[in-house]
Image (tube, rainbow, N blue to C red):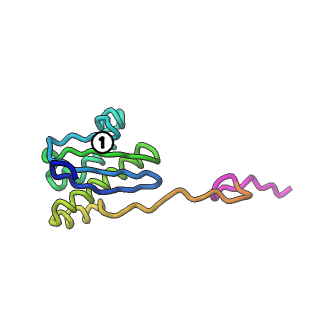
Amino acid sequence: MADSKEIMATGRRKCAIAVVKLVKGKGRIFVNGKKLADYIGNMPSVEMMIYRPLVLTENQDKYDVRVKAVGGGIVAQAAAIRHGISRALLKSNEEYKNVLKAEGLLTRDARVKERKKYGRKRARKRFQFSKR
């Protein structure tokens, strides 16, 4: 660990993995070295999704969040970041468990893309069938 107390946790969603570090600070979020708004662009709903665990536990101004996110797309990474922040907050204080669990923020969303099957266009889509 570094000089200041930092709490680490990992969040996952689809193929995205986010390693989250919570450090005492002013409520700033940095993803892969960029500010959150610069990283996700103009997507306020995604930004709200990431801030959700901090807002629920009333910690939006107490921690700075540093994230290393890899894999997946922007929204999957955002969900992984949210999962990671939730797990880190739980490590910092066990009393947040009921609040976070009620919102479903501690559950790892296990849905992933189904593999393509041979003889098909995609996982389930078939080629057009012609009777005659």
Which residue appears at 29% of the width and 57% of the height?
Answer: 9
Where is residue 75 drawn, in percent x and y? 40, 46
Mark 1 residue crowding within 10 angstroms, few (<14) / some (14–19) / many (20+): some
Occupied quadrant, residue 36: top left
In the figure, is residue 89 to the left or right of 13? left
Type of secondary structure dominating the magenta stretch: loop
Where, quadrant-wise, is the C terminus in this rendering? bottom right
Which residue appears at 14% of the width and 43% of the height?
Answer: 25
Q: Secondary structure at mark 1?
A: helix
The residue closer to the viewer here, 1 or 128, is 1
Where is residue 84 drawn, in percent x and y? 31, 55
The residue closer to the viewer here, 90 or 54, is 90
- Could you tell me the amino acid type at mark 1? Glu
In the figure, is residue 114 to the left or right of 63? right
Where is residue 96 drawn, in percent x and y? 18, 63
Say if the magenta span includes residue 127: yes
Highlighted range, magenta? 121-132
In the figure, is residue 71 to the left or right of 6? right
Residue marked by disc 1: 47
